[in-house]
Image (cartoon, rainbow, N blue to C red):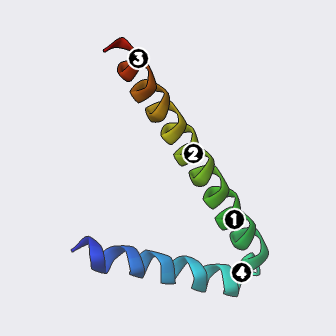
Amino acid sequence: MLNTIWPIFILISFSYAIFSGNLEQLNSSIFESTSDAIKLSIELLRYDMSMEWDYASCQ
């Protein structure tokens, strides 16, 4: 069900951005969100690695 709904939402948002002239804003928001997601993933990975390092030093 979600595999059908999300592509429809994405197509609707791209279509609306094209027809309303906001394609540049949509493009910049996509890149900003991607950048934020990558930064969050790196921070979580760094935190996880530091937790494993602390656990290994306690044994």
Q: Which image quarter holds the C terminus?
A: top left
Residue 27 at what x, y percent from top left? 71, 73
Q: Which is closer to the viewer, label 2 or label 1?
A: 2
Viewer-nearest of discs 4 and 2: 2
Instruction: Indicate the quadrant where residue 21 lies.
Output: bottom right
Residue shown at the point (57%, 38%) measured from the top left: 43
Disc assigned to residue 47: none
Amino acid type, residue under disc 3 in the picture:
Ser
Look at mark 1 in the image and give the residue it sits on.
31
Please state the horizontal and vertical placement of residue 53, each as a whole percent of the image. 45, 26
Tag count:
4
Three-letter code for the amino acid on which mark 2 is drawn: Ile
3D distance between C-alphas at marks 2 and 3: 23 Å
Q: Mark 4 sits on what residue?
A: 20
Mark-to-mark CA distance, 4 and 3: 57 Å
Amino acid marked by disc 1: Phe
- How far is disc 4 from disc 2 in space, using C-alphas? 35 Å
Give the CA separation, mark 2 to mark 1.
17 Å
Q: Nearer the viewer, mark 3 or mark 1?
A: 3
| Of pointers 4 and 2, the one earlier in the residue sequence | 4
The dot on residue 42 is 2
Is 2 on the left-hand or right-hand side of 19?
left
Q: Earlier in the sequence, mark 1 or mark 4?
A: 4
* Residue receiving disc 3: 57
